[in-house]
Amino acid sequence: MGLVRVLPPEIADRIAAGEVVERPASVLRELLDNALDAGARRVEIELAGGGRDLVSVADDGSGLDPDDALLAFERHATSKIRTGEDLESVRTLGFRGEALAAIAAVSRVELLTCPTSGGEGTRVRIDRGRLLGVERASRAPGTTVQVWELFLGIPARRKFLKSPETELDHCLRVVTRAALARPEVGFWLRHGGRTLIGSPAAGEAAGRVADLLGSRLAAGMLPIQGDGGRVAVSGWSARSDLHRPTREDIHLFVNRRPVRDPLLVRAVLDAYRPGLPGGRYPVSVLFIELPPEDVDVNVHPAKSEVRFARPQEVRALLVGAIGQALRGRAAVPVFAGPSGASPAGGAENASGVDEAAPPPHTVRERTGAGEPYAGPAPSPARLGFEGVDEAPARPLAQYANCYIVASDDHGLLVVDQHVAHERMIYERLIKDAESGPMARQLLLFPQTVELPPGGVETLERERTLFERLGFRFEPFGGSTVMVREVPAVLGREARPATLEDLVARAMEGDRSGAEAMFPRLLATVACHSAVRKGMPLSLEQMGYILRGLSACEVPGHCPHGRVISLRVDLAALDRGFDRA
């Protein structure tokens, strides 16, 4: 007896605050949700110490009367829902009534508000859960909430906060996502006297994307549109040559609510996979709209994840809409021409590239290619592009035994012969793999392959996977294996380096599982099977490549994410020669 007791309110509030308030960005997100739910059209944010010392959010929303201003700091006090049924179709960003109470429990807070309905303003001051005062005050209609010294008096929590610079980065992401979701609202963020975000209300979402992500990147964004009846997808997703080292630029919104939902993130990555280099991620701004009753937003303390009534329907629509955009002509980067100022301008006039990625006009040697090919050019039958209708592009010449120069109705195309052939082989391998094991060829003279430490163990562990690819092998002692059969697609190009590359990729992707690794290994097989830089091609062979490329589902980039072709826009040529 006497072991179980009810915690004092101040302790219970601190525990509850730990679920809602993780860092300054959590405070900022909650205050922004309240401002936007109040109908704000202008939001001004002031930070100090990355938000550790001060988070201030001022809006021109509906404001609160004196009674509501005080009641807003009670736990589970909210104007957003009334009954249990309201939780089944939440239409606001906030709804739990926990944020202000949680924030006030672990910091010093001042709320200054005035209702649009008229009357005097109200100031409420609270210090770590203790009410210091309520008084009349002067303010234009709207609300200002200032939060000082987050986790004041809780050293154990405050010491886990990161540096001011890191916390500021998190706050900037929160404001960026809120601003992308609400282009009709003006956002300003200042830190240390400097304006870091100044984005007036925009007439359309495309202008806000260019404002926040930069006009060069925005010009390379492809419009996304999909309608599945009860679910609709819209927004923009960047060409596959514009990628980032993290997932932070995958901006997802469900009914205008910023989310970091794993299902949606995986869907975006699946739409691009395996068209991006390893460790690189796409840039997307995507809006999913569906009836509120078809999505549950009450599944995560931070409201960053959602649960769909029909998740596979949402996923299929998202993957299909992005995939369709990546297959279009606009997905081909433009080598010359003016840069657009917004995604709405179309990617065909884009010239911006990711600074972290190699420029699109850089010659790309494939890894492990060795010396340039100096043997005879293969026959068209060896290239394997039979049965394809006439290509929309016509071959003109080959440059540097590496690039195919072609023309179509829109201008000139410069096509990297190796990555174009690689894409075509990869798509053929994917189709073949769906119908059964890969075709193999028996080596007249078996080859020994020496693998890196751990390579033999990986090969044995994933034996089924490698046999599905078309390899037959057996241990040969130590770190060496004897290869007796190889994928038929490799032809005369079968070399030990192929299996070495595949084993290295399998070792890197151990945590992904065999099925997740399979497309990446097929991409490596395609790379080793494709024509190389330095291989002369006839016009007939170049025509076969262009015809095969036109039949590909994703003609813009190879399976490893490299650009296949660049367009020299005809309109840009006319302007350059004063023929506009």
Image (spheres, helix red, strand yellow):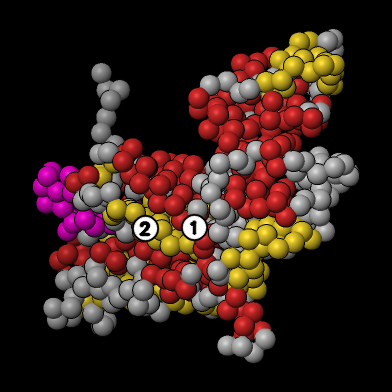
Lateral position of residue 326 relative to residue 258, left or right: right
How far across and down, in percent of the image, does residue 353 sit? Answer: 63, 64
Lateral position of residue 322 relative to residue 291, left or right: right
At x 38% / y 70%, what residue is drawn?
A: 205
Quadrant position of residue 351: bottom right
Lateral position of residue 329 relative to residue 44, left or right: right
For label 1, the residue is 328
Quadrant position of residue 32: bottom left
Query: Which quadrant does the N terminus fall into?
Result: top left
Look at the image and give the residue range highlighted in magenta.
78-96
Quadrant position of residue 369: top right
Q: Nearer the viewer, residue 550 or 193?
A: 550
Q: Nearer the viewer, residue 12 or 511?
A: 511
Indicate the secondary structure of the residue bearing disc 1.
loop
In contact (CB < 8 Å): disc 2 and disc 1: no
Which of the marked residues, 2 or 1, is nearer the chain's N terminus? 2
Considering only vertical position in the picture, is 230 above or below 299? below
Confirm whether residue 223 shows in the render: yes
Marking on residue 225: 2
